[in-house]
Amino acid sequence: MKRSGIVIGAWTFLALIVIPLYPHFVSPNELTRWALVAAAVESRTIEVSSTARILGPRFEDLAIVDGRVYSNKAPGAALASAPGYLLARPFYGPPSAGNIRPVANVMRVVASTLPTVLLALVFVAIARRADVDDARAARVVWILLFATPVFVYGLLLFSHALVGACLFGAWALLFFFAPSRRNDLAAGALIGFAVSSEYTMIFPSMVIGLVLLIERRWSCVARVVAAGLPFAVLLGAYHHAAFGSVFRTPYFYEKLPEYREVARSGFFGLHLPSPATFASLLFDPSRGLLVFSPVLIAAIPAYRAARRRMRSAAWWTLVAIPATILLVYSGYPNWHGGWNVGPRYIVAAIPFVVLPLLFRNGGVIESLLAGFSALAVIFTTLVFPFPPNAFPFPWISLAAPLALDGLVVPNLFHLIGRPAAIAIPTLLILTAIVAAHRRLAMLAVLCGALTAVIAGSQWWRVGNPEVVNLQRRYIAEVYFEQRGAMGEAPVGLLRRRESELRQPPASWPF
């Protein structure tokens, strides 16, 4: 699988050189996990008051109980990132505003990048077992890593890459690879890790359990439950210690009242699926999954080909798991998830949608859609992977103007110079494209990328140019430290600028 190896290697090298922690941008979802791990290691406590203080008073992703401060996230991803903190601690010392960036970046590599690489290797193993040739396997792995939001969440200390890898790995062990006790136990542990990292993963996990029961795989179910039980116990113990009950999650105690109200409505914040939310998850100009990754449309006919290559239980779960995730978040009022690339809450569904492409030879249409998707995802991510909701088609409305000014994601080659910081990631992306495509397919990919540029250039038809331009100038001035970029602005925004400029992480040599 030489071509697949080059694709995975190019993505991995890219992931290791980027350090997407911007000056003065206290990324809430990521740094709340840093705060929890740092407090646990340094002070032997899950209460994060001391570490949250380093992040400043504006920091949001916290849960407050009777004056005590905790992370507002499920603890599984923090647990997964803890080895990264321990690896970095001897080199950077105790937590401080000056070492947040390197320490959190090592944590990200362990908890997000490594699971994404393992996910890609599982795809390669499935391709081998199914006798899929290397050229096709490389194309599909390239789509997974470079043309879907898996690309961005393998580079950030969010839980989504970890959860997607765990859930998909459990499915592969239970339904695709040869049954064994070891596989059952490993699958149970992976499911436990997924649920303890994102509570909603209980729903697709129930789908897996239901199918196992229908198949009467009683001993398998027992082993899966036994391996997942320690994670349930640890999760319950964490909830009880922090919030007074095993059934109380941090979302009930959100620092921000609007998020707290959402969590206390419906069933732990979830409601019945809404057709409008379902449509937004897929088609919203700023966040829609099929807006960023229309290549996933090519998976629809591929499911039929997959049906011929899989046994019934494997195929039905392959369909039901992503459908369940999509339906669950169709009932979540905060479906967009804030400043991020794509609808991040449903990222765990993506590997299940991409896999069927292994079993069908893609044509020109697939390559066109893949080129569109890759440009949208890569360009947005490698400039600023936290576009606010106001930016429709953010690869053009936000990323393109910043990139034209030479502004790209912090990476190690900035230490050499801006040209290297732009050229090396570009070279790695081109290497992956060449490894995954033949000449005609590469031409179609380039045409698809051009189509993404043309489509994105129409952002002003659905966005507010005045708001977009002001927010983009603010991002340039504060998070890229381009002094004077904002120009004239409302007094409130100027005050916010002065407040944020006092926050970590430290400056970066853009």
Image (cartoon, grey):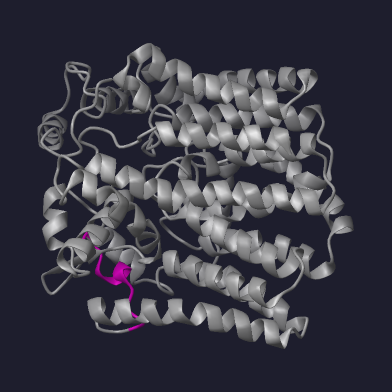
Q: Quadrant of residue 403?
A: top left
Q: Which sits in the foreground, 265 or 126?
A: 126
List the single residue furthest toward the right: 308
Which residue does the image show at 12% across and 29% down from the upper left?
A: 494
Image quadrant for the C terminus?
top left
Q: Is residue 387 left or right of residue 454?
A: left
Q: Is residue 203 above or below residue 142?
A: below
* Numbered range of the magenta stretch: 246-256
- Pinpoint residue 24: horizontal percent, then vertical percent: 20, 35
Q: Which sits in the foreground, 399 or 382?
A: 382
- Pinpoint residue 122: horizontal percent, then vertical percent: 66, 53
Q: Which sits in the foreground, 26 or 110?
A: 110
Q: Is residue 485 left or right of residue 265?
A: left
Q: Quadrant of residue 491?
A: top left
Q: Is residue 291 visible?
A: no
Q: Which SS does the magenta portion mostly show? A: loop
Q: Is residue 306 above or below residue 389?
A: below
List the single residue furthest toward the front: 90
Is 465 magenta? The answer is: no
